[in-house]
Image: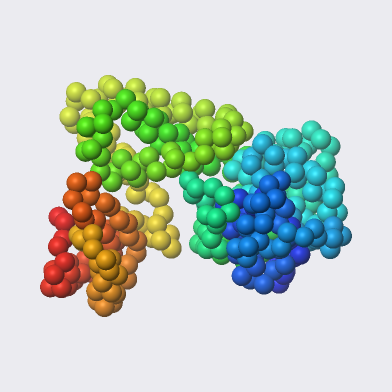
Amino acid sequence: MSAALPHSVGPVVVIGAGLVGTSIGLALRTSGEQVHLVDRSASHAVVAAGLGAGVVDRAEPDEVRLVVVATPPDAIARTVLESLHRYRSAVVTDVGSVKGRILDELRASGADLSRYVGGHPMAGSQHAGPLTAVAELFVDRTWVVSAGPDNQPDDVARVRRMAELCGAQVVAMPAEQHDEAVAQVSHLPQLMSTLTAGHLRQVPGDHLRLAGQGIRDVTRIAASDPQLWRQIISANAEAIRHELEGVRADLDELFAVLDDPQALEEFMARGRSGARLLPGKHGAHPADWVAVVIEIPDTPGALGRLFHDIGAEGVNVEDLSIEHDATREVGYLSVEVSPPFAERLRTAMKAKGWALRA
């Protein structure tokens, strides 16, 4: 039988006042929780506190009920162990991208794992530091909770409740399965983005002027902190190596079909099929949406007027993105809508003087 979720999870200590830690503090404070911030950089903690993520004063150890470790990956296991010793009435969780390595290090230390519940919010960005934090970072995002056999139901419920207070959707998943999954959907894509962006160093500057939104989409996450990603990838190298072997086999096949138009089309179709497997908004199938692309002139207030005109049509927007033209002073707003609304929106936008891109 699962434990009832507690109304309050605090007092809470968040260790690490970077993007994720500060965002957790902001979200919990919005929900009325008492949050104490700890960071080895006093200035980070002060900035996070100034944003409203909590207070910097030291909490009484016996009063703390939850500790969230949001340090860089290499420091997580050590910080979890220190927290288990210091806060003996608290459940300790973390936000690390890899769960198996942490468990291995904690077991090797002989730690009592009954009060440690692993966690991983699938949210973040290529940016870092407390100034990039927002309370809405985790809204509708997946938050993995990796409970162990020694955990008490009440402790697991406290971690689940904390994730829900942050607006996340909780998924229970054992550590080994979690590490395999993130290798497939997070760590491998990061490396593919890095490979693509790294290759751009060999591309002449005149050629880079032809770059469109596609290459920017693919390389966006390559701008992430390499030191952070070195820690993540090193901690999950075995699972990532298995995925890379699959990519190597796919590359060999691609070389083999480059001069065979039919086989090449079939190869490309596999990618399209794979992309359609990713769930979209509210779990909807992205292939069910149609893009209406509207040109935005680079003039003050243009984007606001466009949003107003779209809203006036009563069309439910499923998703949107903005692309900038590299040579003209215009942008393009791609609005994803359900098929029945697509032609209605196109007609309305033309009638209101907006240019559409085919």
Q: Position of residue 100 (x, y in %)?
A: 66, 38
Query: In screen coordinates, is 354 left or right of 271?
Result: left
Residue 290 visible here: no
Image quadrant holding the N terminus, namely bottom right
Q: Position of residue 296 (x, y in %)?
A: 22, 61
Residue 58 visible here: yes
Q: Give the number of callouts.
A: 0
Would you place residue 106 above or below residue 203 in this image? below
Give the residue drawn at x 40%, y 36%: 193
Would you place residue 124 above or below residue 187 in this image? below
Give the residue drawn at x 23%, y 25%: 258
Give the residue drawn at x 28%, y 22%: 255
Image quadrant holding the C terminus, namely bottom left
Q: Position of residue 129 (x, y in %)?
A: 57, 50
Please name whichever residue, 178 or 27, is drawn nearer the observer in this view of the structure: 27
Please name whichever residue, 188 or 310, is drawn nearer the observer in this view of the structure: 310
Query: In screen coordinates, is 202 left or right of 14?
Result: left
